[in-house]
Image: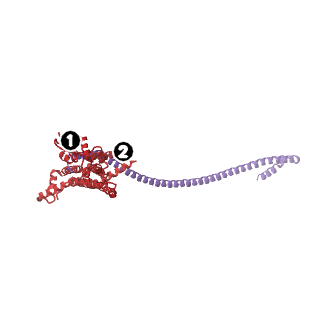
Amino acid sequence: MASESSGRTFQEYLEHHLQNLVYGPLPAGHERKLYSKGSDETTKEAYCQSKNLDYDGEKYCKETLTEDGWYLANNKTDVEAMGFWALHIDTMFFSVLLGALFLFVFTRAAQNFSLDKPTKLQLFIEMMIDFINGVVKGTFKAAQNSLIAPMALTIFFWVLLMNVMDLVPVDLIPYPAELLGIPYLKVVPTTDLNLTAALALSVFVLYLFYSIKSKGFVGFIKSISLHPFGPWMLPANLFIEIIDLIAKPLSLALRLYGNLYAGEMIFLLIAGMVSINLTSFMGLGLNLAGITLSLIWAIFHILIVVLQAFIFMMLTVVYMNMAHEKFEQH
Amino acid sequence: MNLNATLLGQMIAFGLFVWFCWKFVWPPLLAAMEERAEKIEQGLKDSEESAKKILNAEEQSKKMLAEAKKEAKKIMDNAKNQSEKIVEESKNKATEEKDRIVGSAQSEIEKEVVNAKKTLEKDFAASVMSAVKKIVAKEVSMSNYQDTVDKSLDDFRK
């Protein structure tokens, strides 16, 4: 949809939708390029001039920075120049918004909790608490830790809400945002590796913390060096166990990211079909096919959305249980 | 695709969310749910207990009713006996009284009879004497016949 109206090719449309809104530092001397809007050279040049920028004669307005500063990235070259200290504003915004929504609803429910006359919302929340509590009680048996259940609840609902953003039509939010002057907008935070990696890393940090806390530092070292072959195969043990250790956060992060990124990509590809004009018979057919496919994929995606949130939560609880286990000599 | 400071921002956000949920969301909700579970359990227990109590009370009342019936029967039997006894006693008394009254009346009558005899005797003797006096005065002197008169009077007395 957006690809035609803004004069982009389908390739550019895809790239545009897969680019986060990045805010970060750029050094002096960096050449910024801004995608120029317009149907021909004169309108494009006029667009650049309206922003006090030079026109490169093809697609972009150019600007060479005279001093260091923080900017919104216009494209991939900007993002690469920003390096590590760049922030994905859209990911931060939507994730914090959804997390706050989750906490707001649950806090309200806790405050207005009625023993005799529960509202439907309260009943739903009670069901969820019961469900999470059941999962945690069934899986987390190594020790007592009051943090695990609330963390599982937070992970499940936060990830679920962020995943659900994937069911919002792909152009519904980014397109109006672009008209308002926001160049890029990814509304599904879980399609950003930064977010899934942040969750996985946080879980991993807790894993290491509780592992060392319950086994002791020596016990923890023993648990990764004396398994599974015994002390005389220490290097092999260390190699295997460290891979096993690193695989935990890596798989956690990449599983969620991959599932949601792929899902979003398929929505985008289907949306590309719909964007073809409606005048020809072929175009009409493609549009109908696109709408149908989009619907089918969305229904199927509901399953993935919930499943991935559940898997992330479940694995976190499982890892926490492993971390709390005492070291045993086999 | 590339990792950047967003990672750190998200870790902080995640930590804050989990902390908030840990402190302010999970405990009150779980506590409230547990409270209700307890309440329901207590209610069930109470209702079971009260059902038992009702059963007990029913039994008790049945027992009491039976006892009361027994008691009433006893009382009625007693009363019957008592009344029979009273009737019997009063009958006896009445008979006794009757006998006594009749007896006293009889003795009175006998006394009267004796009295009447005496009076009659006196009256009769006087009238006989006066009649004899009159006859004797006409025929003989009284002194000649005193013995005969006394003799006849003795006979009369017999």
Asked whether B77 or A83 is in front, the reply is: A83
Residue A193 image offset from top left, x and y in percent:
22, 51
- For image coordinates 77% across by 47% down, the residue present is B119
Of the residues tagged 1 and 2, which is closer to the observer?
1
Residue A165 coordinates in the image, percent (x, y): 30, 50
Mark 1 residue crowding within 10 angstroms, few (<14) / some (14–19) / many (20+):
few
- Please, which residue is most extreme toward the right here? B138
Q: Residue at x 16, y 50 (%)?
A: A217
Chain hosting mark 1 = A
In this view of the protein, which residue sits in the foreground, A59 or A153? A59
Q: Colour of chain B?
A: purple
Pointer 2: what residue? A112
Q: Which residue is mark 1?
A: A70
Residue A47 higher or lower than A302, as above or below: above
Q: Chain of mark 2?
A: A
Q: What's under tag 1, amino acid-wise?
A: Trp
- Residue displayed at 12% across by 59% down: A233
**Is disc 2 placed on a helix, strand or loop?**
loop
